[in-house]
Image (tube, grey):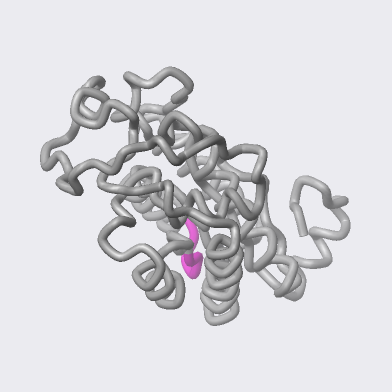
């Protein structure tokens, strides 16, 4: 159930019996030369909406923009600074807590968001005794990790991964181009906080340690369903 499609009296009645809310978060950033820049928030929103529908709880529209400064050298990336993201997320979470949503699960699809989202959750939860806010990456579910390892092993990498590309192929095939020519790079990550051009200098196509040419919509369907199962279980147990 989308919160932005609801009538306020219905939300008021809902809050008399349930205080759970899902909030998907992602990014708009480069994902190689043949994958849509919005993949992170698109997947997070799809997973969160399916889990919310299954459980009969509300889900907000996605926080599309995230912390993606390290991809700034690639056109099409649109990022917030960590300080801006912190204020925005903390304000929004705090407001939703104040509305009566005492249990909020942020379904995150972009690893670069995690530190700032956790800080924002700490600020928002501090404002109301009893409020619980969980930052949950959809890809951390045990079933998802296991299937990714079975399907792709060491070729999964860490950015423009065949797993995420597979899910987008299943959900929105028109947003994936020809990934066959994206070359797998060495898996080593930059250990320092990368600057504006570090990622593009080291990984010119944008993929990091991954082989997106292995992606398939069939595996994407499996991973999507496992992710929905994982998020639904987290919310049901929260």
Seen as rendered, the residue at the extreme bottom is 237
Q: Main secondary structure of the magenta part?
A: loop
Residue at 59% x, 79% y: name it: 236
Q: Residue at x 65, y 52 (%)?
A: 171
Residue 130, how many percent across, how many down? 49, 70
Using residue 10 as the reference point, say whether residue 141 is left or right of it: left
Residue 61 in magenta stretch: no
Count of numbered tags: 0
- The magenta stretch is 127-132
Is 102 positioned to the left or the right of 209 in the image?
right
| Location of residue 14 with respect to 34 vertically, above or below | below
74 or 8: which is nearer to us? 74
Judge left or right: residue 192 versus residue 227: left
Give the percent coordinates (x, y) of residue 73. Answer: 32, 19
Taking the spot 45% from the left edge, 70% from the top edge, the residue there is: 144
Name the residue at 45% across, 51% down.
124
- Residue 230 vertical position relative to residue 73 in the rendered view, above or below: below
Q: In the shown orientation, is residue 228 left or right of residue 57?
A: left
């Amino acid at each position: 159930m989308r919160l932005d499609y609801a009538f306020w009296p219905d939300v008021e009645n809902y809050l008399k019996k349930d205080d759970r809310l899902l909030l998907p978060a992602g990014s708009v950033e480069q994902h190689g030369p043949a994958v849509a820049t919005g993949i992170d928030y698109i997947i997070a929103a799809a997973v969160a909406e399916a889990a919310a529908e299954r459980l009969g709880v509300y889900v907000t529209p996605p926080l599309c923009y995230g912390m993606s400064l390290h991809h700034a050298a690639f056109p099409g990336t649109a990022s917030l600074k960590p300080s801006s993201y912190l204020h925005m997320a903390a304000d929004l979470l705090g407001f939703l807590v104040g509305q009566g949503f005492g249990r909020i699960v942020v379904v995150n699809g972009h690893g670069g968001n995690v530190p700032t989202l956790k800080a924002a959750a700490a600020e928002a939860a501090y404002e109301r005794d009893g409020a619980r806010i969980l930052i949950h990456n959809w890809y951390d579910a045990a079933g998802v990790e296991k299937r990714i390892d079975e399907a792709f092993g060491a070729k999964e990498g860490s950015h423009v991964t065949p797993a995420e590309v597979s899910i987008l192929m299943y959900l929105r095939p028109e947003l994936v181009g020809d990934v066959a020519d994206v070359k797998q790079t060495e898996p080593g990550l930059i250990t320092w906080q990368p600057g504006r051009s570090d990622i593009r200098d080291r990984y010119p196509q944008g993929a990091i340690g991954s082989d997106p040419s292995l992606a398939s919509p069939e595996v994407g369907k499996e991973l999507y369903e496992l992710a929905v199962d994982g998020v639904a279980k987290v919310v049901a147990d929260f």
